[in-house]
């Protein structure tokens, strides 16, 4: 269906790659597409949590990666002045997605996508598995929560407030 295709595209766009030399991948280096993808997944979680759970589980390593990229401990914002904090929107929309998923389909944040695929046909499996998660540390279910906790110290107030809601403060 069109909804499943959109979810598969959104999962692919959540993935960040350093270059766009692969025309077969739907991963992107464009932060605007990443933000839009996270917003799309958030809308899907709100509208149809059961159907969106598998897409969120597949995108979870990419969401954790986005949270980690904006961790203040990484020092990426040293060149920013006090009025501008570059990239805060990606962290913010990633946190909003986590917040919605935690409320509507929490299993998507703790399970892998294959365990949520009961009833999915082969076409759905191929479409959503087209993009694999970043290797290693972001595959762990607690990577999202660790990233959210680290963003409590982010310079942008909206990111701090969203992180506080996710962690439960």
Image: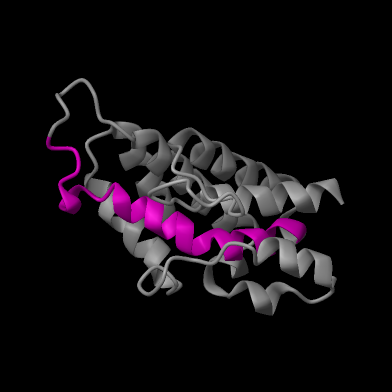
In this picture, which residue range is highlighted in magenta? 51-78
How far across and how far down the image is residue 127, in percent? Answer: 72, 61
Q: Residue at x 66, y 77 (%)?
A: 114
Is 77 a magenta residue?
yes
The foreground one among 158 and 139 is 139
Q: Along the horizontal axis of the image, is 56 left or right of 149?
A: right
The foreground one among 23 and 152 is 23
Is 119 a magenta residue?
no
How far across and how far down the image is residue 50, in percent? Answer: 75, 61
How far across and how far down the image is residue 169, in percent? Answer: 35, 52
Q: Along the horizontal axis of the image, is 101 left or right of 85?
A: right
Query: As displayed, is residue 146 above or below residue 154?
Result: below
Q: Residue at x 37, y 75 (%)?
A: 136
The foreground one among 25 and 150 is 25
Q: Residue at x 87, y 52 (%)?
A: 1
How far across and how far down the image is residue 21, in percent? Answer: 48, 48
Prevailing secondary structure of the magenta residues: helix
Q: Along the horizontal axis of the image, is 24 left or right of 159?
A: right
Q: Along the horizontal axis of the image, is 159 left or right of 110?
A: left
Report if residue 142 is visible in the image. yes
Query: As displayed, is residue 53 above or below residue 139?
Result: above
Q: Residue at x 64, y 63 (%)?
A: 130
């Amino acid at each position: 269906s069109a909804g499943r295709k959109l979810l598969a595209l959104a999962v692919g766009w959540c993935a960040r790659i350093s270059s766009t030399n692969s025309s077969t991948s739907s991963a992107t280096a464009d932060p605007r597409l990443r933000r839009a993808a996270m917003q799309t997944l958030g809308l899907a979680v709100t509208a149809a949590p059961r159907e969106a759970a598998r897409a969120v589980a597949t995108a979870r390593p990419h969401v954790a990666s986005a949270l980690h990229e904006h961790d203040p401990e990484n020092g990426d914002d040293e060149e920013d002045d006090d009025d501008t904090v570059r990239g805060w929107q990606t962290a913010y929309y990633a946190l909003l997605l986590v917040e919605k998923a935690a409320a509507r389909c929490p299993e998507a944040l703790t399970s892998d996508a294959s365990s949520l695929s009961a009833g999915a046909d082969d076409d759905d499996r191929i479409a959503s598995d087209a993009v694999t998660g970043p290797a290693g540390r972001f595959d762990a279910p607690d990577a999202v929560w660790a990233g959210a906790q680290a963003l409590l110290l982010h310079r942008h107030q909206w990111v701090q407030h969203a992180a506080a809601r996710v962690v439960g403060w």
